[in-house]
Amino acid sequence: MYPSRFRYEAPRSIDEAIALLRDGGGEAKVLAGGQSLVPLLKLRFAAPELLVDINSLPGLDYHRVDADGTLRIGALCRHADLERSTVLAGRQPTMAAAAPLVADPIVRNRGTLVGSLCHADPQGDWASVVTALGGHVVAQGPDGRRDIPIADFVSGPFQNTLGYDEVAVEAVIPAPKGTPAGGYLKLERRVGDFATAGVAVAIELSGAVVTRAGIALTGVGGSTIDARDAAQSLVGGPLTAESIGQAADLAAQAAQPKTDHRGSAEYKRHIVRTFVTRILSSAVSKETQ
Ligand SMILES: Cc1cc2nc3c(=O)[nH]c(=O)nc-3n(C[C@H](O)[C@H](O)[C@H](O)COP(=O)(O)OP(=O)(O)OC[C@H]3O[C@@H](n4cnc5c(N)ncnc54)[C@H](O)[C@@H]3O)c2cc1C
């Protein structure tokens, strides 16, 4: 199917992009990698009057670490940039594990992490990773910039809290205060598919003690699930078979899966429990190496 007719603009500055969105009055859409928006246009699930293509905006294709360890990912940083990143290795194990699992190489070459957060697909991998890491999105609009914690940014399935005249300019991951550990595991029916279930675990350690933990779940609810109780149960003690088992059980309880063509609800809950156990057990074996 062909998309509905739309006007296309490719602004050269962020101010110009914001002005176009403002003039669009809610009928305009930002186009980043196009890997979610273009299929929606072709299926006519979306029919904006105006597309504001941000790909010509300078200086948004970065991902970098500040002197204090804060990681910043610009709106035009592609999934593939993160997959090939030398910045993430060692510093951000959860992100490094997720990057090669997002979609397929063709999609990864164009799609962006920030676009994935904006799209807010319950099966989006990055929203879980950024949730586990306690990140936020920086939005820029006519009144300047504001920080939106990821928990407040994703407001439901395919919904975010950006104003119609705001561009998400970057995602920010706070600097780890302890030694970072964790990972991302995803069960997919075939390579490149969306998750049947996915689990992001991000912990920080001081010696053997967990000082911070985040656990988030992909594809097992109406939106990304922040399994806070599971994560909190780990903080303040070492990773033991008992603490890992308890966190895995709490994460499985936090999941709200539905039975569908990808598997039964109980099967998906079982996957969540297994993935939390695997990621945390692997963190223990790396710690003792
Ligand atoms: C075949 C296929 C398989 C896929 N598999 C997976 C998968 O396994 N896991 C996964 O997580 N994703 C998957 N995706 C989705 C992919 O990751 C997309 O790249 C991502 O969801 C959206 O990023 P984008 O840059 O392409 O955004 P676009 O498609 O350009 O935009 C998506 C939405 O976000 C808005 N938006 C984008 N950027 C901004 C911004 N900077 N500011 C404001 N609004 C913005 C757009 O207006 C639009 O509403 C798949 C896609 C395809 C086509």
Image (cartoon, rainbow, N blue to C red):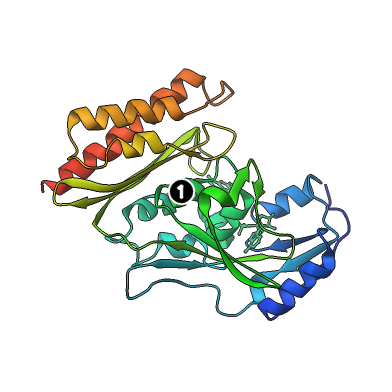
Residue 11 location, x and y as percent? 73, 77
Secondary element at tag 1: helix
Q: Nearer the viewer, residue 180 or 100?
A: 180
Residue 96 vs residue 235: left or right?
right
* In the image, residue 51 above or below residue 117: below
Q: Nearer the viewer, residue 269 or 190?
A: 269
**Residue 11 visible in the shown view:** no
**Residue 22 visible in the shown view:** yes
Q: Nearer the viewer, residue 50 or 81?
A: 50
* In the image, residue 277 above or below residue 152: above
Residue 141 location, x and y as percent? 68, 70
Residue 205 vs residue 184: left or right?
left
Residue 279 vs residue 221: left or right?
left
The kind of residue tagged 1 is Thr
What is the number of callouts on the image? 1
Residue to which mark 1 is pinned? 131
- The image quarter containing residue 29 is bottom right
